[in-house]
Amino acid sequence: MTANGLTSSDLQDRVKLDIIRYANCWEDADILCEALRPAPGVRILSVASGGDNSLALAAEGADVVAADVSPAQLACVELKCAAIRRLEHPAVLAFLGVSESSGRLATYERLERDLSEEARAFWRDRRGELAGGFIHAGRFESYFAFFRKRVMPLIHTRRAVTELLRQKDEAARHDFYERRWNNLPWKLVFRIFFSRFVMGRLGRDPEFFRYVEGAVSDRILSRVRYALTVLPTHSNPFLDYILTGNFSRSLPRYLEPGRFEAVREGLARLTLFHGSVEDAARAHEDGGIDGFNLSDIFEYLDGPACTAIFDGLLTVAKPGARLAYWNMLAPRRCPEGLSDRVTPLTDLASELFERDKAFFYSSFVLEEVR
């Protein structure tokens, strides 16, 4: 989930970009990797955001260009890369904030030499975020922290949260949701906290709702119910973080122990780019691009802006290249005037979306260049 990574200059002019909006990526890297088929010899243009999914793609052997218009987001990615490069897996988890540590500032001093001047300048005045584990420093993460600490106690006890996250089969998850979880306070408070008004002031920038029509909370609530009943709750890192404040039960793909060495090896194939998706595509057009991880950028833009971006991407895309992106609240597809240049992979996208652990989105779109 990002509006920082790969957007037109129109959005750049409307949104504040010098803060960390997303210290983590809030899209499911597992379905993304299945959709884009990263492998040696494949080049992927990826929204940078928190860096998690770009690292996951590079770990599969692909050459990845991770672009972002926000220096704050790129500073997060640089620091994650430095930690993975220099530290062993337990120390990475401790430094990022997954596990306990009292020595993060000392660790940062070891890593700082790996950072660009821009990233060093960004972190210079953010010692508090570093000491607390910077994967908790994003505006979106703070939004969930407020929900967990101030809102959830009005709805459910910690015991109920623990029971929700306990491993159960699907029938038991449905029973627990209907019998214990889906009470009146849950319905009422959810609709308030995940309304357009509250989300725009505490979580996402109000500009991100410019092209959204209709009620926001009702659509999100429907997907949350799916995540709490159909999908396993004990192994969902997004749900884990929202309800516990950390990845205490399951880790994002790029931090899984069994993938650590592949992620570290993939750092050599990861290129960071400060700029919009249009600029990144033009700068790397030689040789073409095989895949595009576009997060949910299109729903923040109007029709002409979406068309301009699609046109630019399709110009540098190789035949057979895939474009993967999410819709959260505003439906977006390849614009009608360009649709004859792509084939919607509707069945595959639907099958992947059924397993999507990042349950905030209303759809996952996958299109293949003809």
Image (cartoon, rainbow, N blue to C red):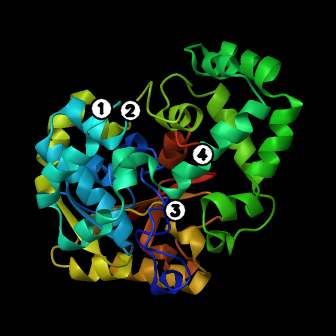
**In this rendering, which labeled residue sits more in front, label 4 or label 3?**
4
Tell me the residue that label 4 is attached to.
144
Q: Are marks 2 and 1 in contact (CB under 8 Å)?
A: yes
Q: Residue at x 47, y 49 (%)?
A: 27
Q: Residue at x 73, y 58 (%)?
A: 198
Asked whether residue 59 is in view, the answer is: no
Measuring from the top left, give residue 346's x and y in whole percent: 53, 52
Q: Which disc is residue 296 wearing?
A: 3
Inter-mark Cα distance, 4 to 3: 19 Å
Q: Secondary structure at mark 2?
A: loop
**In this rendering, which labeled residue sits more in front, label 3 or label 1?**
1
Q: Residue at x 39, y 40 (%)?
A: 30
In the foreground, 288 or 153: 153
Inter-mark Cα distance, 4 to 1: 23 Å
Measuring from the top left, give residue 366's x and y in whole percent: 46, 56
Tell me the residue that label 2 is attached to.
251
